[in-house]
Image (cartoon, rainbow, N blue to C red):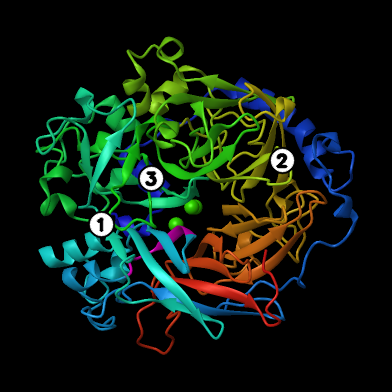
Amino acid sequence: MTTNPDDLSFDEFDEYINPRPAETDFDRIVDSALSRRDLLKSVMAFGSVAAFGNVLINTPASAAQDRFAFAAIPSSTADNITVPPGYKAHVVTRWGDPLWSNAPEFDHATRGNAASQALSFGDNNDGMEVYPHGDKFILIVNNEYTNRGVIWGNRPEGKAENNDDILKGMNAHGLTSVEIAEDNGAWSVVKDSPFNRRFTPDVEMDITGPARGHDLMKTNADPEGTVARGTFNNCGNGSTPWGTYLACEENFNGYFATADEEHPVSDSMKRYGISPKGRGYGWEKIDDRFDLAKESNEYNRHGYVTEVDATDPTSRPKKRTALGRFKHENAEVVVNNDGHIVVYMGDDERGEFLYRYVSDGVYAPGGETDSLLEEGKLYAAKFNDDGTGEWRELSPEATGMANMAEVCIHTRMAASAVGATTMDRPEWVSANPMAAEIYCCLTNNRNRGVKANAGGDETPVGGPNPREANKYGQIVRWRPDGADHTSSTFSWDLYVLAGNPAVHSDDRAGSANINEGNMFNSPDGLKFDSNGMLWIQTDGNYSNEKDFAGQGNNQMLLGDPVTGEIRRFLTGPKQAEITGLTWSPDRRTMFVGVQHPGERGEGHWPDGGESSTPRSAIIAVTRDDGGLVG
Ligand code: FEO
Ligand code: CA
Ligand code: CA
Ligand code: CA
């Protein structure tokens, strides 16, 4: 059987190359199902004040008022963007838009080449941030990956036909930093700005932290193990209080491959999904770093958080190994009351973990910041069914590993060793600016209660992962004890269980704050705005059929963390995911990412017509009256 990796999600690909054993522990499943029933009772009660001991939330005085500045909109299957009355949206930049005047405009017939792509906005934009710099605005954004059928859609088979095609795909990855400006309410790219930069998978960056110089980081091209090239498959992002951007490397495994399908696969390769069968990007054909037979350590140099200063065009990115190596979704940075920097991070794969990093030093505005993401402690979350939880430190002693370098390279195995809780694919994490509480999207997990994770850890139904073969996802939140983000203990509950009450009446209908008017599946992007309201973006099943009937295209919703109410704000074009969110400093523009429109051949957003190539893009959402948008 021939499998086209483009037809597989990243998780499906991981299981295709590394099939999971089926779960057999029947007694454990029955026990978990019983405790799940009790948990669901409380989740379903959400919205009534008593449900989660609201004493833990700093309820604002205005909680009783409607904090939504818009009327909810219906779901949509149209190939466009819809927003509520009183709002409008326009495209700021799209895949292939030139950043410099010596680059050609995007060619819909050829979809560009390696040279034009290196000078243009990358593909599949995801996490992003806007930094003010003097009187300028610098947008920096992840260009996560490429869809073969789109980037090579000019080829009859939708496959690279030559090395230039492969390099075009490579150059469409990485990060784009670009100056943007507003004119008469419309934002656009400032071509030729000194702040315009592409960070392709070829750009040099320093390896910092415990793994720097470790034997596992040494390669033929870098015998010292201190300088990596490239950052790629960056999904969500983070931002530091000192004004730097954090790009989070997610599904880095699929770029490594080799011709010999029998090439040996070690346990650590298996845990991270490294396999001779790549995902079809073809990089091993043009760069030996990605050929497993020619280079055995390159994959240890990816899967990190990379820090970039977008406001300094001469700055050199830094891979922050202290934050661990896994399939990073985003990195939510919190300054604790005592100045410690705390970073919350999810590992997005079925049955993987939630992590926390706590800096050894403390942050002082204007002071030294370089050590804050280099020297610190790493933890993984253990959730108990009774609504409590703890952070388990990933030290050499606790994990049985030789040193912190190994912990920071083999972080998944370290977290397995301390018995962290296997989660339903942790996506974005966001901290409430109004209260010491953190939210995380658990997007879905069809293996919950069915199969172990890639390391063989069981995935029992229960705790924050209460539904077997979870199709819809949920949002968990936790509150550190003593409102101290460095505390080793916390309490947790579920903010929402997504579901479809039009189709199901059991736990698949979702929690009490889900109804036929606001239902969605697969929450992914997540970000609090300055008002303490929670924006939720989806990356789910857009078939609008069966379990997903009535949910339409992927979308963005707004949730009130105090009342539990959720309203739909935006719907995306066909086959797109909505991901990436930030604001202009004056909060009158909200920037929203639209990723992989028309990824399976249906759709022509944003340029429309019958022959245009669909293109990922960033849109700007504003109010007709010029008011604040979050
Ligand atoms: Fe790139 Fe977990 O989404
Ligand atoms: Ca995501
Ligand atoms: Ca996702
Ligand atoms: Ca995505």
Q: Nearer the viewer, residue 371 or 16?
A: 371
Which comes sooner in the sequence, label 1 or label 2?
A: 1
How many marks can you see? 3
Q: Earlier in the sequence, mark 2 or mark 3?
A: 3
In the image, residue 499 sits, relative to residue 272, either above or below, namely below
Specify whether residue 124 is painted magenta: yes
Per the image, label 1 sits on a secondary structure element best described as: loop
Q: Nearer the viewer, mark 2 or mark 3?
A: 3
Give the mark toward the camera: 3 or 1: 3
Query: Tag 1: Cα neighbours inside 10 Å, few (<14), some, or many (≥20)?
Result: many
**Where does the image place residue 450, in percent across and percent down from the top left?**
53, 34
Amino acid under disc 2: Leu
Q: On residue 361, which mark appears?
A: none
Q: Which residue is mark 3?
A: 307
Specify start and end residues of the magenta stretch as a single range: 121-129
Q: Tell me where residue 29 appears, x and y as whole percent.
A: 62, 27
Residue at 24% of width from left, 55% of height from top? 280
The x, y position of residue 457, in whole percent, is 47, 25
